[in-house]
Structure formats: C-alpha cells, structure tokens
Image: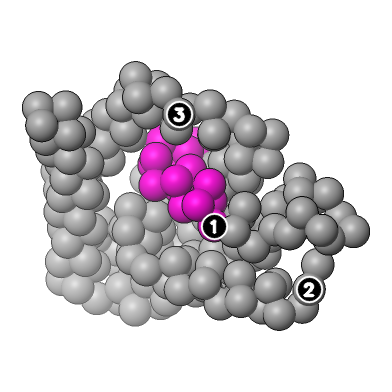
Amino acid sequence: MEATAVTAFWGVSLVFALTPGADWAYVITTGGRDRRGVAPAVAGLLTGHLLAIASVVVGVATVITSSPLAMTLLTLAGSCYLVWLGIAALRRPAEPPRTPQPPSFGPGRGFATGVGVSLLNPKVFLLLLALLPQFASPTAPWSLGQQMATLGLIHLANCAVVYVAVGVGAAAALTTRPRAARAVAVASGVVMIGLGLTLIVEQVVAHVG
C-alpha cells in the first residue's frame, strides 16, 4: 500500500473519530459516572467497530446495504436502541459519588452496551463501506481484503485513542463536579435521543417520499 494513501486515510478517519456522536455520548456518560467504567465501555465500542470492519471486508455489509428492507430494519433497531439509552441517561443522570463506590453496573454490562451502541449504528457500516474501498488499490501487491482490513485497523486505532481520551477526560473533569456531571449526562442523553429520532424520521420520510 502506498504511504500517501495510508496517511490520507488516517487523516480522514481521525476526523470522523473526532466527530461527536452516540459513541462520544456513551463514553462521556460512562466516564462521568465512574472512571472504572471507561475501559469496558471503550472495549465494547471498539469490538462493535471491529465486527463492522470484518463484515465490510467479507462483503456482508455490501449485502445489507444493498437490501432496502435489511437496511431499514437495522437503522430502526439502532435508532430505537439509541433512544432507549438516551431515556435511561435522562432518568438516571450520572452523579459522581462523594465516597468511593462500585460502578452502577459491572464491566460486562458496560462492554455489552458499548457493543450495542457501535454495532447497531448503521452509520458505522456506511462510513466503513464508503471509505475502505476508496483507499484500496486493485493494483497493489496486497489483496483488496488485506488492504481494507489494514485500513480498518488504522481506523480502530484512531477510535481507541479518541474514545479513551474522551472517557478519561470526562472522568477527570466531572467526577469532582456533581452539577457538571449531571448536566453532561443530561446533554448526552438528549444527543442520543436526538440521533435516534433523526434516523427514524429519515427512514419515515424516505419511505413516504
């Protein structure tokens, strides 16, 4: 693979990783609640991304996105999940405890929720499906699959750095500021609900139109 293509992809991928969305909202909410929840939350998000990358490489995502019904069902499932997470965040906004306490839920649940947030977000599939083939060359010594897998891992590394920084930063900034933590948790919940409802509306408009 040409170094210029890899560098260009790294820059584009980093821009997308730095764009706030449902993943940011989830990791900020988790970090604001308890620093120990950041690692499993980020691990879950990255696992979802890894599965999405693998599906793009083997062609599953192409099949999904070429089927209007499958794409609609995936979008609606992801949208409802985001709305559900947002409502949960609004009902129980994170407030840092004054004395050390165990996390409100275990690492297993935090990991599973992260996987769900990432894997049920159709924009993850669409982003990877749009980007990976564009930076892979059919004339390169490596196969297209190997090239896209490598680029996918670069994107995964970008996401890992950004998510950890966001989660640790949220934990450091919010765990000693109860009011700020509550405000950020509420804002994160609103963002997730807004993203979910926007995706639902887009599907309704697309089908009605």
The quadrant of the rendering that contains the N terminus is bottom right
Within 10 angstroms of label 3, few (less than 14), some, or many (20 or more) residues? few
Q: Point out the tag, 2 or 1, that comes first from the N-terminus.
A: 2
- Label 1 neighbourhood size at 10 Å, few (<14), some (14-19), many (20+)? some
**Left or right of residue 107: residue 142:** right
In this picture, residue 78 sits left or right of residue 44: left
- Looking at this view, name the residue that lies furthest to the top: 69
Taking the image as shown, residue 111 lies to the left or right of residue 155, namely left
Q: Residue at x 46, y 73 (%)?
A: 15
For label 2, the crowd category at 10 Å Cα-Cα, with few meaning under 14, some 14 to 19 and many 20 or more, is: few
Q: Does 109 lie within the magenta span?
A: no
Amino acid at pointer 1:
Leu
| Position of the C terminus by quadrant | top left
Residue matched to label 2 = 2
Question: Disc 3 marks which amino acid?
Answer: Ser
User: x, y (%) of residue 178?
Assistant: 21, 69
Q: Is residue 88 visible?
A: no
78 vs 36, nearest the viewer: 78
Q: Which mark is residue 66?
A: 3
**Quadrant in which residue 8 is drawn:** bottom right
Display colour scheme? one colour
> Which residue is under mark 1?
131
Task: Pick whichever of labels 3 and 2 is earlier in the sequence.
Answer: 2
Quarter assignment of residue 54? top right
Q: Which residues are magenta?
A: 112-131
Q: Position of residue 153 (x, y in %)?
A: 69, 57
